[in-house]
Amino acid sequence: MRTTGLLGGSFNPAHRGHRRITLAAIDALGLDDAWWLVSPGNPLKPAAGMAPLQARLASARAMARRAPIRATAVEARLGTRYTIDTIRAVQRAHPHRRFIWIMGADNLAQFHRWRDWRKIARAIPIAVVARPGYDGCALAGPAMAWLRRYRRPRSAAQRWTMWSLPALVLLRFRPDPTSATGLRAGDPDWHLRMMRGPSSQEFPWPLPLP
């Protein structure tokens, strides 16, 4: 039974902060690997300024090189729009893996706006990575008011496969100042180069097992 972290996002573009946080989560949670789920379109984010999926997937695959991280646009292949549907499809396709959902504190702050967010919490354990500037509103938000009773200690993070659901653990790592917004501002044409690269090709589905 292999263990895998799922990190969803726009990856517009993927950057070293994504990589560092993912590697730190793999270590803290004792995971075999992590999968980046590059979203075809986040319902809570504006479409303006969003690079084509092909370019964002290519940037994620390039950033994941030589690491136990796989990048996929599986939601586009499945036709799923909401996280709960993606999680259920991934779990059905890989019954011999155990999955944990990884997200930043900025996502926890708006988690109550996600479709069927309580069902997500009942379907998969959640690891929340602290993010400067968001921790206060995340811990005081509507979702955490419900999830607080299910919080597990950081010292038990590597035993997450034994938790009953819902279950949530808060992780804190050295912050990385890199932001996708800053990268886009400094290099607005980044996606044009990514569209030309071989790494823009999609992974097959289901994902091949190591």
Image (cartoon, grey):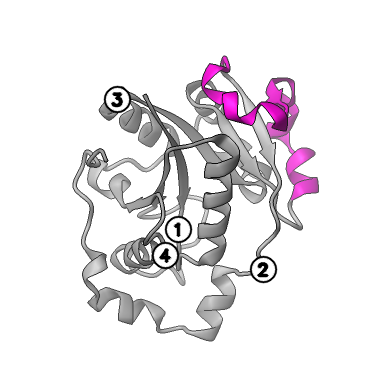
Residue type indicated by callout 4: Met
Q: Which residue is mark 2?
A: 177
User: Distance from label 2 to label 1 (Cα)?
Assistant: 18 Å
Tell me what residue is drawn at x 19 percent, y 47 percent. Answer: 204
Residue 37 drawn above or below residue 133: above
SS of the residue under disc 1: loop
Say which label, 2 or 1, has the lower sequence index.
1
* Image: magenta residue range: 135-164
Residue type indicated by callout 2: Pro
Do residues under tags 4 and 1 come within 8 Å of each other at their CB atoms?
Answer: no
User: Distance from label 3 to label 4 (Cα)?
Assistant: 28 Å
Q: Which residue is mark 3?
A: 92
Task: Tell me if mark 1 has few (under 14), some (14-19) or many (20+) residues whose alpha carbon lies within 10 angstroms of its own.
Answer: many
Towards the viewer: 78 or 62? 62
Q: Is residue 38 magenta?
A: no
Q: Which residue is mark 4?
A: 63
Q: Which residue is mark 1?
A: 10
Say which label, 1 or 3, has the lower sequence index.
1
